[in-house]
Image (spheres, grey):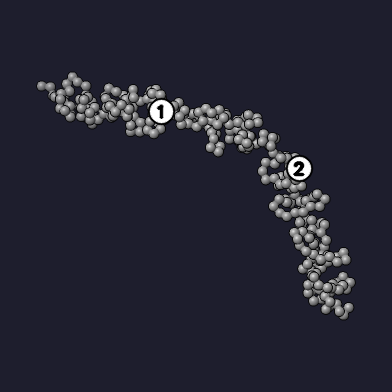
Amino acid sequence: MTERYDCHYCKESLFGKKYVLREENPYCVKCYESLYSNTCEDCKKPIGCSSRDLSYKDRHWHEDCFHCFMCKRSLVDKPFSTKDDQLLCTECYSNEYSSKCHDCKKTIMPGTRKMEHKGNSWHETCFTCQRCQQPIGTKSFIPKDNYNYCVPCYEKQFAMQCVHCKKPITTGGVTYHEQPWHKDCFLCTGCKQQLSGQRFTSRDDFAYCLNCFCNLYAKKCASCTSPISGLGGSKYISFEERQWHNDCFNCKKCSVSLVGRGFLTERDDILCPECGKDI
């Protein structure tokens, strides 16, 4: 006698019928579909054994239901994207959600290289220098008046030229006598040190740091022999072609300050009236 071969769930005979094995137990098609079939995300019907079950992130579709939410074209074996749990073909997703090129206004397709600057996007081939029209790519550029320029073109068209070396000034220039200089070119005439960021003065239109100017041109104090710059409001005393720092204009004998007071001279010395009364 032939052994019975029944559905594990409804116990009906499977003799001569299609069946499905699950965990080594046979099920008739009807029971298997009611117990284990996935529900299609689109039509909400079970995906039967005779249908292809397409899945994405624990969601399932009939093959005929796996299509773009917007244009309804099939997505079977094609690239796709999702937005708010909806399936979209690459073209529809790009048209609806991808960046638009700031230059040509066309969609920048996913997966293609794009350039971004201050919230705007460009195709790589559209991100070009306004002057030479060559792609900028990853090279340095300078924006001006809503246009972008490669550095060489910007320097040729807009940058001031240093009065000393005649080369363009792109950053950190210095203006002296209404003329532009590179910081590295604006140097003391005497010691050749940079003058940018420090006090300086000039003589005959040549710039000098204070040290060089004092050493070269300032009068010397008759007392300490150090230069008297007279710059920055510093005060000094002048008498008969001799000069003194305010702090050096003191009585030779008692060292009292003679600034604003009467004084006497004895040869090269200056004396207060008290010390000079015996002269």
Q: Position of residue 271 (x, y in %)?
A: 84, 74
Residue wearing tag 1: 88
In the rendered image, the quadrant that contains the N terminus is top left
Q: Which residue has dot 2 on it?
A: 163
Q: Residue at x 38, y 30 (%)?
A: 86
Say which label, 1 or 2, has the lower sequence index: 1
- Residue found 55% across the figure and 38% down from its top: 118
Q: Amino acid at mark 2?
A: Val
Q: Residue furthest top?
A: 16
Q: Looking at this view, is 190 or 261 the one in front?
A: 261
Q: Is residue 53 visible?
A: no
Q: Residue furthest left?
A: 1
Residue 21 rendering spot, x and y as whole percentages: 23, 27
Q: Secondary structure at mark 2?
A: loop
Quick check: 191 above or below 241? above
Residue 140 location, quadrant: top right
Please give the name of the residue rendered at 75% of the width and 40% of the height, measured from the top-left corner: 166
